[in-house]
Protein backbone atom coordinates (compact mmCIF):
# COMPACT_ATOMS: atom_id res chain seq x y z
CA UNK A 1 0.00 0.00 0.00
CA UNK A 2 0.95 3.67 -0.25
CA UNK A 3 1.31 5.88 2.81
CA UNK A 4 2.59 9.32 3.73
CA UNK A 5 5.90 8.69 5.47
CA UNK A 6 8.60 10.79 7.13
CA UNK A 7 12.02 10.82 5.52
CA UNK A 8 13.32 12.76 8.53
CA UNK A 9 11.98 14.93 11.35
CA UNK A 10 11.48 18.57 10.46
CA UNK A 11 9.56 20.81 8.06
CA UNK A 12 6.95 19.74 5.52
CA UNK A 13 9.63 18.56 3.09
CA UNK A 14 9.93 15.53 5.39
CA UNK A 15 6.54 14.26 4.18
CA UNK A 16 6.66 11.79 1.32
CA UNK A 17 4.30 9.22 -0.25
CA UNK A 18 6.00 5.83 -0.32
CA UNK A 19 5.26 2.10 -0.21
CA UNK A 20 4.67 0.54 3.21
CA UNK A 21 3.61 -2.97 4.26
CA UNK A 22 -0.12 -3.58 4.68
CA UNK A 23 -1.18 -3.46 8.36
CA UNK A 24 -1.46 -6.89 9.99
CA UNK A 25 -4.80 -7.23 11.75
CA UNK A 26 -5.43 -9.19 14.94
CA UNK A 27 -8.43 -11.35 15.79
CA UNK A 28 -10.49 -8.37 16.97
CA UNK A 29 -9.27 -5.86 14.39
CA UNK A 30 -10.65 -4.72 11.07
CA UNK A 31 -8.71 -3.51 8.05
CA UNK A 32 -10.12 -0.24 6.74
CA UNK A 33 -9.74 0.96 3.18
CA UNK A 34 -9.14 4.63 3.97
CA UNK A 35 -10.97 7.22 1.89
CA UNK A 36 -10.12 10.25 4.04
CA UNK A 37 -8.15 11.22 7.10
CA UNK A 38 -7.80 14.48 9.03
CA UNK A 39 -5.00 16.66 10.33
CA UNK A 40 -4.45 17.16 14.04
CA UNK A 41 -1.93 19.26 15.96
CA UNK A 42 -0.35 15.99 17.09
CA UNK A 43 0.61 15.30 13.46
CA UNK A 44 2.58 18.54 13.29
CA UNK A 45 4.43 17.67 16.49
CA UNK A 46 5.14 14.10 15.37
CA UNK A 47 6.51 15.39 12.06
CA UNK A 48 9.04 17.43 14.04
CA UNK A 49 9.98 14.50 16.26
CA UNK A 50 8.24 15.94 19.33
CA UNK A 51 5.34 13.50 19.76
CA UNK A 52 6.25 9.86 19.07
CA UNK A 53 3.51 7.24 18.70
CA UNK A 54 2.73 5.04 21.71
CA UNK A 55 4.77 1.81 21.87
CA UNK A 56 3.58 -0.77 19.40
CA UNK A 57 1.53 1.66 17.30
CA UNK A 58 2.13 2.65 13.68
CA UNK A 59 4.74 5.33 13.08
CA UNK A 60 2.62 6.65 10.20
CA UNK A 61 0.88 9.94 11.02
CA UNK A 62 -2.89 10.18 11.28
CA UNK A 63 -5.21 9.78 14.28
CA UNK A 64 -8.59 9.29 12.55
CA UNK A 65 -10.00 7.92 9.33
CA UNK A 66 -13.19 7.27 7.42
CA UNK A 67 -13.49 4.40 4.97
CA UNK A 68 -14.93 0.95 4.44
CA UNK A 69 -14.11 -2.38 6.02
CA UNK A 70 -11.88 -4.42 3.71
CA UNK A 71 -11.05 -7.36 6.00
CA UNK A 72 -11.85 -8.59 9.50
CA UNK A 73 -10.26 -10.70 12.21
CA UNK A 74 -11.78 -14.00 13.27
CA UNK A 75 -13.38 -12.63 16.46
CA UNK A 76 -14.94 -9.50 14.95
CA UNK A 77 -18.70 -9.35 15.40
CA UNK A 78 -21.39 -6.88 14.39
CA UNK A 79 -19.68 -5.73 11.19
CA UNK A 80 -19.46 -6.82 7.58
CA UNK A 81 -17.03 -6.34 4.71
CA UNK A 82 -17.97 -3.11 2.94
CA UNK A 83 -19.48 -1.34 5.98
CA UNK A 84 -18.76 2.38 5.96
CA UNK A 85 -17.10 3.41 9.21
CA UNK A 86 -15.11 6.09 10.98
CA UNK A 87 -12.72 5.58 13.87
CA UNK A 88 -10.08 7.00 16.15
CA UNK A 89 -6.52 5.70 15.77
CA UNK A 90 -3.28 5.91 17.72
CA UNK A 91 -1.48 6.23 14.37
CA UNK A 92 -1.55 5.02 10.78
CA UNK A 93 -4.25 7.22 9.28
CA UNK A 94 -2.18 8.79 6.48
CA UNK A 95 -2.33 5.58 4.44
CA UNK A 96 -4.47 3.69 1.96
CA UNK A 97 -5.26 1.08 4.63
CA UNK A 98 -5.37 1.23 8.42
CA UNK A 99 -6.28 -1.19 11.17
CA UNK A 100 -8.58 -0.56 14.14
CA UNK A 101 -10.19 -2.53 16.95
CA UNK A 102 -13.75 -3.36 15.89
CA UNK A 103 -15.23 -1.99 19.13
CA UNK A 104 -13.87 1.46 18.29
CA UNK A 105 -15.75 1.72 15.00
CA UNK A 106 -18.63 4.14 14.51
CA UNK A 107 -20.93 3.69 11.50
CA UNK A 108 -21.00 6.62 9.10
CA UNK A 109 -23.95 8.88 9.96
CA UNK A 110 -26.67 9.20 7.33
CA UNK A 111 -25.99 11.77 4.58
CA UNK A 112 -22.42 12.43 5.75
CA UNK A 113 -19.61 12.11 3.20
CA UNK A 114 -16.36 10.29 3.80
CA UNK A 115 -14.52 13.60 3.92
CA UNK A 116 -16.90 14.96 6.56
CA UNK A 117 -16.79 11.74 8.56
CA UNK A 118 -13.00 11.84 8.70
CA UNK A 119 -13.30 14.99 10.81
CA UNK A 120 -15.49 13.48 13.53
CA UNK A 121 -13.58 10.97 15.67
CA UNK A 122 -10.67 12.93 17.15
CA UNK A 123 -12.55 16.20 17.60
CA UNK A 124 -15.79 14.87 19.04
CA UNK A 125 -14.31 12.12 21.22
CA UNK A 126 -11.74 14.56 22.64
CA UNK A 127 -14.46 17.12 23.31
CA UNK A 128 -16.78 14.50 24.83
CA UNK A 129 -14.01 13.28 27.14
CA UNK A 130 -13.13 16.84 28.19
CA UNK A 131 -16.66 18.14 28.77
CA UNK A 132 -18.53 15.07 29.99
CA UNK A 133 -16.02 12.64 31.49
CA UNK A 134 -13.48 15.07 32.96
CA UNK A 135 -15.16 18.48 33.14
CA UNK A 136 -18.51 17.08 34.38
CA UNK A 137 -20.32 19.94 32.64
CA UNK A 138 -23.88 20.30 33.93
CA UNK A 139 -27.03 21.87 32.55
CA UNK A 140 -27.05 25.72 32.77
CA UNK A 141 -23.38 25.87 33.80
CA UNK A 142 -21.02 28.23 31.99
CA UNK A 143 -18.12 26.84 29.97
CA UNK A 144 -15.20 28.73 28.43
CA UNK A 145 -13.72 27.03 25.36
CA UNK A 146 -10.41 28.40 24.11
CA UNK A 147 -9.55 28.04 20.40
CA UNK A 148 -13.26 27.89 19.67
CA UNK A 149 -12.83 27.61 15.90
CA UNK A 150 -10.44 24.65 16.05
CA UNK A 151 -11.58 21.13 15.32
CA UNK A 152 -12.03 20.20 18.99
CA UNK A 153 -13.34 23.70 19.74
CA UNK A 154 -16.14 23.49 17.17
CA UNK A 155 -17.09 20.04 18.46
CA UNK A 156 -17.02 21.22 22.08
CA UNK A 157 -19.34 24.17 21.34
CA UNK A 158 -21.93 21.84 19.87
CA UNK A 159 -21.70 19.24 22.64
CA UNK A 160 -21.93 21.94 25.33
CA UNK A 161 -25.11 23.30 23.74
CA UNK A 162 -26.60 19.79 23.60
CA UNK A 163 -25.88 19.64 27.34
CA UNK A 164 -27.77 22.95 27.71
CA UNK A 165 -24.76 24.89 28.98
CA UNK A 166 -23.90 28.55 28.36
CA UNK A 167 -20.96 28.65 25.96
CA UNK A 168 -18.24 31.31 25.83
CA UNK A 169 -15.31 30.99 23.43
CA UNK A 170 -12.07 32.75 22.63
CA UNK A 171 -11.00 33.12 19.00
CA UNK A 172 -9.81 35.82 16.64
CA UNK A 173 -12.62 38.11 15.50
CA UNK A 174 -12.84 36.71 11.97
CA UNK A 175 -13.77 33.31 13.46
CA UNK A 176 -16.61 34.56 15.68
CA UNK A 177 -19.36 34.16 13.08
CA UNK A 178 -18.67 30.43 12.76
CA UNK A 179 -18.64 29.96 16.53
CA UNK A 180 -21.92 31.86 16.93
CA UNK A 181 -23.49 29.69 14.20
CA UNK A 182 -22.56 26.57 16.17
CA UNK A 183 -24.20 27.89 19.32
CA UNK A 184 -21.62 30.01 21.15
CA UNK A 185 -23.42 32.54 23.35
CA UNK A 186 -20.44 34.89 23.67
CA UNK A 187 -17.26 35.25 21.63
CA UNK A 188 -14.16 37.02 22.95
CA UNK A 189 -11.35 38.25 20.70
CA UNK A 190 -8.25 37.06 22.54
CA UNK A 191 -6.05 39.36 20.44
CA UNK A 192 -7.61 42.57 21.73
CA UNK A 193 -9.36 41.73 25.01
CA UNK A 194 -8.37 40.29 28.39
CA UNK A 195 -10.89 37.44 28.62
CA UNK A 196 -10.56 37.19 32.41
CA UNK A 197 -11.64 40.82 32.80
CA UNK A 198 -14.61 40.27 30.49
CA UNK A 199 -15.73 37.24 32.46
CA UNK A 200 -15.67 39.13 35.77
CA UNK A 201 -18.35 41.53 34.51
CA UNK A 202 -22.08 40.83 34.62
CA UNK A 203 -24.47 39.33 37.13
CA UNK A 204 -22.84 35.86 37.08
CA UNK A 205 -19.05 36.38 36.98
CA UNK A 206 -16.72 33.58 36.06
CA UNK A 207 -17.23 30.15 34.51
CA UNK A 208 -17.70 26.64 35.86
CA UNK A 209 -15.57 24.78 33.29
CA UNK A 210 -12.65 25.78 31.06
CA UNK A 211 -11.35 23.74 28.11
CA UNK A 212 -7.81 24.98 27.42
CA UNK A 213 -5.34 24.22 24.65
CA UNK A 214 -2.98 27.16 25.21
CA UNK A 215 -1.20 26.39 28.48
CA UNK A 216 1.17 28.76 30.26
CA UNK A 217 0.12 32.14 28.75
CA UNK A 218 -3.51 31.64 29.85
CA UNK A 219 -2.98 29.92 33.19
CA UNK A 220 -3.24 32.97 35.44
CA UNK A 221 -6.30 34.31 33.60
CA UNK A 222 -7.91 30.87 33.66
CA UNK A 223 -7.52 30.63 37.44
CA UNK A 224 -9.04 34.09 37.78
CA UNK A 225 -11.96 33.12 35.54
CA UNK A 226 -13.05 29.95 37.32
CA UNK A 227 -15.86 30.04 39.86
CA UNK A 228 -15.83 28.26 43.20
CA UNK A 229 -15.38 24.50 42.60
CA UNK A 230 -14.53 25.25 38.96
CA UNK A 231 -12.92 22.65 36.70
CA UNK A 232 -10.27 23.21 34.05
CA UNK A 233 -9.32 20.54 31.51
CA UNK A 234 -6.00 21.15 29.77
CA UNK A 235 -5.68 19.49 26.36
CA UNK A 236 -2.65 21.23 24.86
CA UNK A 237 0.31 23.53 25.30
CA UNK A 238 0.15 25.59 22.13
CA UNK A 239 1.51 28.61 24.00
CA UNK A 240 4.15 26.69 25.96
CA UNK A 241 4.36 24.91 29.29
CA UNK A 242 6.71 27.05 31.39
CA UNK A 243 5.34 29.43 34.04
CA UNK A 244 7.86 31.72 35.78
CA UNK A 245 5.70 33.42 38.40
CA UNK A 246 2.14 32.63 39.38
CA UNK A 247 -0.03 32.70 42.49
CA UNK A 248 -1.62 29.31 42.99
CA UNK A 249 -3.77 30.58 45.85
CA UNK A 250 -6.98 30.49 43.75
CA UNK A 251 -6.59 26.72 43.36
CA UNK A 252 -6.84 26.32 47.12
CA UNK A 253 -9.30 29.04 48.06
CA UNK A 254 -11.73 28.35 45.20
CA UNK A 255 -11.34 24.56 45.50
CA UNK A 256 -10.42 24.29 41.82
CA UNK A 257 -9.94 21.06 39.91
CA UNK A 258 -7.14 21.20 37.31
CA UNK A 259 -6.98 18.19 35.01
CA UNK A 260 -4.72 17.36 32.09
CA UNK A 261 -5.39 14.81 29.41
CA UNK A 262 -4.19 13.39 26.14
CA UNK A 263 -6.26 10.81 24.31
CA UNK A 264 -3.73 9.15 22.05
CA UNK A 265 -1.80 7.49 24.88
CA UNK A 266 -4.90 6.09 26.61
CA UNK A 267 -5.40 2.34 26.69
CA UNK A 268 -7.50 0.61 24.04
CA UNK A 269 -10.03 -0.34 26.72
CA UNK A 270 -10.41 3.31 27.77
CA UNK A 271 -10.89 4.46 24.18
CA UNK A 272 -13.41 1.68 23.53
CA UNK A 273 -15.47 2.79 26.56
CA UNK A 274 -15.26 6.43 25.45
CA UNK A 275 -16.29 5.57 21.89
CA UNK A 276 -19.21 3.42 23.05
CA UNK A 277 -20.42 6.10 25.48
CA UNK A 278 -20.33 8.78 22.80
CA UNK A 279 -22.02 6.54 20.25
CA UNK A 280 -24.83 5.55 22.64
CA UNK A 281 -25.48 9.02 24.02
CA UNK A 282 -24.64 11.46 21.22
CA UNK A 283 -23.65 10.02 17.82
CA UNK A 284 -27.29 9.83 16.70
CA UNK A 285 -27.36 13.64 16.86
CA UNK A 286 -25.41 13.74 13.58
CA UNK A 287 -28.52 12.33 11.92
CA UNK A 288 -30.78 14.95 13.53
CA UNK A 289 -28.45 17.82 12.62
CA UNK A 290 -27.75 18.81 16.23
CA UNK A 291 -24.13 17.80 15.72
CA UNK A 292 -22.11 18.28 12.55
CA UNK A 293 -18.45 18.04 11.64
CA UNK A 294 -17.05 21.45 10.70
CA UNK A 295 -14.77 21.05 7.69
CA UNK A 296 -12.52 23.94 6.72
CA UNK A 297 -10.90 22.43 3.64
CA UNK A 298 -10.14 19.20 1.80
CA UNK A 299 -6.67 18.59 0.33
CA UNK A 300 -5.58 15.75 -1.93
CA UNK A 301 -3.12 13.72 0.10
CA UNK A 302 -0.40 14.58 -2.39
CA UNK A 303 -0.76 18.15 -1.05
CA UNK A 304 -0.12 17.10 2.54
CA UNK A 305 2.71 19.63 2.85
CA UNK A 306 0.37 22.48 1.93
CA UNK A 307 -2.19 21.17 4.43
CA UNK A 308 0.36 21.10 7.26
CA UNK A 309 1.56 24.60 6.40
CA UNK A 310 -2.03 25.83 6.40
CA UNK A 311 -2.68 24.41 9.86
CA UNK A 312 0.59 25.79 11.22
CA UNK A 313 -0.51 29.25 10.07
CA UNK A 314 -3.64 28.83 12.23
CA UNK A 315 -5.89 29.73 9.29
CA UNK A 316 -8.40 26.91 9.57
CA UNK A 317 -11.95 27.13 10.88
CA UNK A 318 -12.67 23.53 11.77
CA UNK A 319 -11.00 20.40 10.42
CA UNK A 320 -8.52 20.02 7.58
CA UNK A 321 -9.10 16.82 5.62
CA UNK A 322 -6.81 14.73 3.40
CA UNK A 323 -8.51 12.77 0.62
CA UNK A 324 -6.65 9.48 0.17
CA UNK A 325 -6.22 8.20 -3.38
CA UNK A 326 -6.47 4.56 -4.51
CA UNK A 327 -5.55 3.08 -7.91
Image: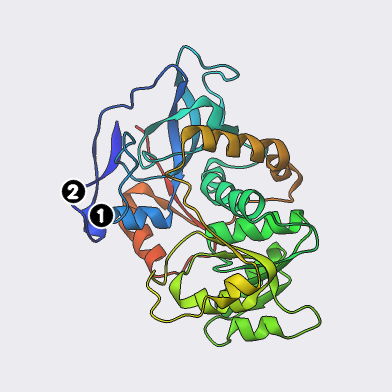
Q: Is residue 139 left or right of residue 180?
A: right
User: How far apart are labels 1 and 2 at the CA level?
Assistant: 12 Å
Q: Which circle marks residue 326 in the picture?
A: none
Report which residue position mark 2 lands on.
7
Judging by the rendered image, the residue that carries numbered circle 1 is 49
| Residue 152 falls in image quadrant | bottom right
**Figure check: 173 above or below 266:** below
Q: Residue at x 54, y 44 (%)?
A: 121
Q: In the picture shown, does residue 166 fall above or below 118?
A: below
Task: Evaluate whether residue 275 shows in this view.
Answer: yes
- Image height check: is 314 above or below 160? below
Are the residues at dot 1 and dot 2 in contact (C-beta closer than 8 Å)? no
Residue 265: percent from left, percent from top:
42, 44
Q: Earlier in the sequence, mark 1 or mark 2?
A: 2
The residue lying toward the viewer, choosing from 274 and 34, is 274
Left or right side of 82 for 327: left
Q: Is residue 163 above or below residue 230?
A: above
User: In what element is the residue under mark 1?
Assistant: loop
Helix, strand or loop at label 2? It is loop
Indicate the position of residue 173 as horizontal and vertical percent values.
58, 80
**Quarter of the N terminus within the rendering:** top left
Amino acid sequence: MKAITLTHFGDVDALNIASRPMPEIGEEDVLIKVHATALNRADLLQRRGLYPPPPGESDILGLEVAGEIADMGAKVTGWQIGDRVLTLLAGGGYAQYAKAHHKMLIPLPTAITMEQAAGIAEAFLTAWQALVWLGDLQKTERVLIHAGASGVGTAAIQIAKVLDAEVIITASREKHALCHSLGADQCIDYKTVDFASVLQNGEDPGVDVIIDFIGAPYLSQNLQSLKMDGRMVMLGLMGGGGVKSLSIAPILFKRLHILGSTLRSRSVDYKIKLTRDFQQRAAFLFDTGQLRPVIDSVFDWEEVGKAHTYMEANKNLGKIILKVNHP
